[in-house]
Image (cartoon, rainbow, N blue to C red):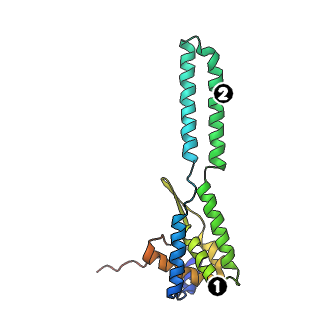
Amino acid sequence: MSDLSEAIASATPSEYLNEEDRAQVREARDDLRDTHLPAPTGQVGCLAAMLAVVAAAITLRLANNVPGFVFIAPFVILGALLTVIGSIVWGMSGGSGGRNAASAAIESALSYLEDEGSDRSVCLRAATVLLMRATIDEGPATHSMYEPGELVVRLGSRLPLVVAVEELLMDKHGIRPVFTFPLPEPDH
């Protein structure tokens, strides 16, 4: 049995969530669904780079055949080169706004969960943020925002609460499992 499985097994049974707790989790879930993460812009940069390369290729072709394009060609090629370089830099630094926002939300939630003096309602909201931002769907890719094994240590005594919130969200609201996994149905 792995360390993660043992830690999660020790956190079960999860804490009991009364109806007020469940309502707070549902409210936090609704707030998160209404708050959209920034759209990934890396695809726009990739498209701009491809268009710049096509424009440069067409300009070179026209410069050989049309005399007036000889004077314009260096500027178009320079613009294309700057666009390609700019899109690469943009993709590496600014193209992952959704992941950056989710990471900041997760760190904030973890700070509340790690603080033993945090109010239960704040911890319920933080657990909801932690679980709902565990994976980010960006177009064709899904990104896992953290390694659950590392969080087990950070969550410490709050792990049973997080597991209880996860069970509620998985059962009623279809999130992906993070710390718990449904048991497979036995074959008959």
Q: Amino acid at mark 1?
A: Ser
Residue 52 position by quadrant: top right
Element type at mark 2: helix
The tag earlier along the polypeptide, 2 or 1, is 2
Q: Residues within 10 Å of mark 1 (few under 14, many from 20)?
A: some
- Which residue lies under the disc numbered 1? 157
Q: Quadrant of the C terminus?
A: bottom left
Toward the left, the furthest residue is: 188
Residue 116 percent across, percent down from the top left: 70, 84
On the question of residue 68 being in view, the answer is yes
Determine whether, in the image, residue 142 is placed left or right of residue 186.
Answer: right
Determine whether, in the image, residue 92 is placed left or right of residue 26.
Answer: right
Q: Which of label 2 and label 1 is nearer to you?
A: 2
The residue positioned 56% from the left and 37% from the top of the image is: 48
The residue positioned 57% from the left and 59% from the top of the image is: 37
On the question of residue 2 being in view, the answer is no
- What is the C-alpha distance between the residues marked 2 and 1? 58 Å
Element type at mark 1: helix
Q: Residues within 10 Å of mark 2 (few under 14, many from 20)?
A: few
Q: Amino acid at mark 2?
A: Leu
Residue 131 percent across, percent down from the top left: 55, 72
Residue 70 position by quadrant: top right
Question: Which label is found at residue 78?
Answer: 2
Q: Quadrant of the N terminus?
A: bottom right
Relative vertical location of residue 44 with respect to residue 183 in this rendering, above or below = above
Residue 167 percent across, percent down from the top left: 48, 79
The residue positioned 52% from the left and 75% from the top of the image is: 27
- Between 44 and 121, the one nearer to me in the picture: 121
Question: Which label is found at residue 63?
Answer: none
The residue positioned 63% from the left and 26% from the top of the image is: 77
